[in-house]
Amino acid sequence: MKKYTSHLYTLIFGILVFVFFTFFYYSHLYYQEQLQLFLYIDSYFFDMVCRPGGMSGYIGAFFTQFYYFPWIGALIIALLLMLLQELVLFLSNSFRRQPQWMLLSFIPSVMYWSFLCDENAMLAGLVALNLTLIAVCIYLIPDKLWKRTFTLLIGSVILYYWVGGVYVLFIIFGVLFEIFRFKDSRKRGAIVAQIGGLLIIIILPLVTSTFYQDTLPRLYWGMNYYRFPNTDFYSFMYMWVPIILVPLVFAALPSQKTDKHRSVLFFCQLFGILFLAWFVLGQNMNFQKEEIMNYDFLVRGKNWPAIIKKAEKKIPKAPMSVADLNLALCQEGQMADRMFSFFQNGPEGLLPTFQRDFTLPLVTNEIYYYLGFINTSQRFAFEAMEAIPNYEKSGRVVKRLAETNLINGEYKVAEKYLKILQKTLFYRKFANRTMKLLGNEEAIDKHPEYGWLRKCRPEKDFLFSPAEKDMMLGTLFVHNKQNRMAFEYLMAYYLLTDNLKAFSKCLKLGESIGYKRMPTSYRQALMYLDSHQ
Amino acid sequence: MYLCLVVSCNRPVTNPVYVARYPSIYPDYVGVTIPCRIAPLNFISTDTVDLIDVVLQGKDSRIHIQEDQVVDIPIKKWKKMLANTAGDSIMVTVCIRKGKGWRHYLPFPIYVSRDTLDYGLVYRLIAPGYEVYSKMGIYQRELDNFDQTPIMENTLVRTSCLNCHAFRHNNPDCLSFHVRGAHGATVIQQHGEGSERFMNTKVDSTLSSCVYPYWHPGGRYIAYSNNLTNQAFHSARNERIEVVDKASDVVVYDTKKNKLLLCPRLMTDAFETFPAFSADGKKLYFCSAEKKDIPAQYKEIKYSLCSIDFDAQNGTFGDKVDTLISTRDIGGKSISFDRPSFDGKYIMFTLSDYGNFSIWHREADLYILDLRTGKYRPLTEVNSKETESFHDWSSNSHWFVFSSRRDDGLYTRLYISSIDKDGKATKPFMLPQKDPISNEYSFFSYNVPEFVIAPVHVSTRNLNIGLMSKEREQFGMKKVE
């Protein structure tokens, strides 16, 4: 039983991680999934692996696709963190068996757990760490020094291209094991390994720079660990250093023989770990972002009632969330009545201004899409994808591009995107289903979403003008006077910009919508106008 | 032994049904004319097939391939066949098996020209986006195989935009390209690898940094445009982007004296752009449009093709600007990308309804002007219903490469065609790919294709160091009359 106690702690840890990501942080996972496009084609594989750290990037992307179902993503993260802990424990015990210090082996996993709370932390980094530590385990297998030296030198080079910058841990562990375990550090073979390892660390990225173009810091410290490429070495230090320190602690600290001391030690470690977890997770968890992402998650799933229900519980203030809420209210026919029951931040809460990033345009594209501004939705979605900092593509965006091109009758382009989506796991069904619509005008016109949006999109061209959103909304509505969303957004725009004159002038246009009664906010606006005239 | 058995176990084509038409293949290589040195024209059937059987019959050789999808022609055998078939044609017989039966299609020819083609192509790969750009790079591709290597990718200097690469008459020893962004510069290389200079091209009297480049044949001068460019976005379904210049001028950079030559006849209120030196360097061609109010009158901007004399000895310009083709003469349409052939016979240009950024104009087509007769005509042999835009001549002026969106209307692919002595073009062929299906999954468009007569050698280490440092050589300027 004692033999399995450590695994029991690992399991408990894994369950905690799983529960955290499944129930409290799942929108982050869903958000991450949409910022990549894992394709089951040879060119995608070769493109990924033909760069330093590419294999771990490929495996990380493979696992990340399962974030489409956040609970599966949570399970994968839990398993990888558990594996990390087990590997650290195994390596630490390989230095010196110290069961009483066992809980220290959770430190790296706790640190990495907190790192993964950052939505830009890539799973590839955790995969790379695990692969590196597995390589260290393999290093320990040969009993002869020359074999270990050979493994270290050849393994380092292979590992660099598989996992990127974190491979240095393999070399460092190799040297440490020769010192502390094999006690061969002064033998010629070990010295060769040490010098060779150092030379590899210095030279290998330089050599790589001659045939692979990237910045030297990234070639040295790794390129798939974080979504933003301009990250310095120190960002990863706080996760890598504990992985080396914990085994060193095992090697350095004395054993505790008495049960009483062991119990004290255990509880000290437990409280220490819990405190560490509380502290580091507290630093990196961001439930404000989780809320914003949750709204977007619901928009993506077209779960309008859930958005409204969520807002009724806690009124959102973040601009993106307000925009999502307004979209949901409109989709449910409640905007004209209820929008001012919630926090409004002006016209930015209706149609946010374009920004060159990968988050806001993704949200805004949804609003333009449902309005019927298909070209604008297409542009915002495309721009969001192009803005992804690590140059990945987005399954969500490619799906939207397939839809906008289908609606616009650009069947060849739509087909291209659908063929790409057919090479994915979770977008394949959509792609197969939608392929049947290509060129089938009748089927598209009858489609409840695409057919309707075809009728809404403007036929007469005009240039998008961010300063004249009311003009654009008005033009859209005049083109299709059943486009309730266009009308209500136009009215909302006037109300939010205090342009009551234009509001009252355009109100009559809404007759074609067929309101059974005057919506609340319009009635209130008219009353205000009357009282001030 | 086992491998030999496996390899030789092609299914025989038995009792095929004869189909009296050419097979439907992608890319469409039926009846194209190719140079005697080009990568294999691998293709696929556009129909779903179980097996595709292809026999290529050259003058003295035969290649037989049977595949389930991509017809992957062995490169060594192909090269040998081309070498022996120059001036003649290869007959390609395609049989397709679907289910139990074979279908035998009409054999089609691939003509092998005796005219040689340059060593390679340089192009940019970039997504057909709007304002934001992701990964992009300038690449070189050897034409007789599938090797593509990066000259520079924007992973080397993050968040940078690379554009407007140009060579002196396809000679890679003289290279100019721009890097935009926080570490921006114009990179000029005149003496091969290691001679990179990092320039700041904006001077007080110019509108902007230098944009569209064109080398003088002598190698001393580079003509540039200066452009104040804006983008606007269409709301209606068939159009996406409008790129308009609010102002533009043409200037010439003297690399020997490090001076930008500013001529008032090239810096008027009109919009001058797309400079290109004549083959002998004695003239400077460019496009010019009457100034209009932007953005209100963006559809009324129509460029004419003009020229001005240029004295390379003194770095001076002629007294007047000649109009070779006025927008009025050409049905009120607009000319862009004027590119003279290197033998001095032709100018190829792109014609669109208005404006100059023709890649976003679906009606844009290639035209050719015969400088000897002054007559011009559309290149109907190569134009399609979709955009044909940027183009470049091979060094012997017998071939040209151009960008086309004929595949799907959005993603640009490269096509190569030959020009005979009468100025007639042959059916263009798409730049061959090892796996033609790779185009389907690519998010990149091919952009600004330029032939090169030899490999481009650029030191990426120097590029990285030079661009990351803040030091730039400043263009000087000289006002000339």
Image (cartoon, rainbow, N blue to C red):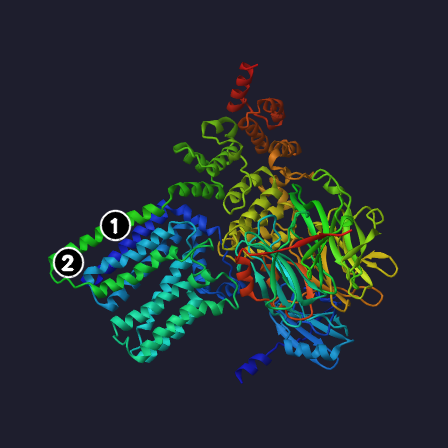
Q: Residue furthest bottom?
A: B1
**B173 w.r.t. B85: above or below:** above
Residue B361: percent from the left, percent from the top? 71, 49
Label 1 Cα crowd, 10 Å radius (few <14 / some 14-19 / many 20+) = some
Residue B366: percent from the left, percent from the top? 77, 56
Taking the spot 54% from the left edge, 45% from the top edge, the residue there is: A356
Q: Quadrant of residue A56?
A: bottom left
Q: Quadrant of residue B341?
A: bottom right
- In the rendered image, which quarter contains the C terminus of chain A? top right
Helix, strand or loop for disc 2: helix
C-alpha separation, residue under disc 2 versus residue under disc 1 = 18 Å
Label 2, on which residue?
A: A262
What amino acid type should be assigned to the residue bearing mark 2? Arg
**B435 w.r.t. B233: above or below:** below
Label 1, on which residue?
A: A274
Query: As rendered, which of B157 and B79 lies closer to the eye?
Result: B157
| Tag 2 and tag 1 share a subunit | yes
Query: As rendered, which of B174 and A266 lies closer to the eye?
Result: B174
Residue A154: percent from the left, percent from the top? 40, 74
What amino acid type should be assigned to the residue bearing mark 1? Leu
- Compared across the picture, whether B366 is left or right of A299 comes to right
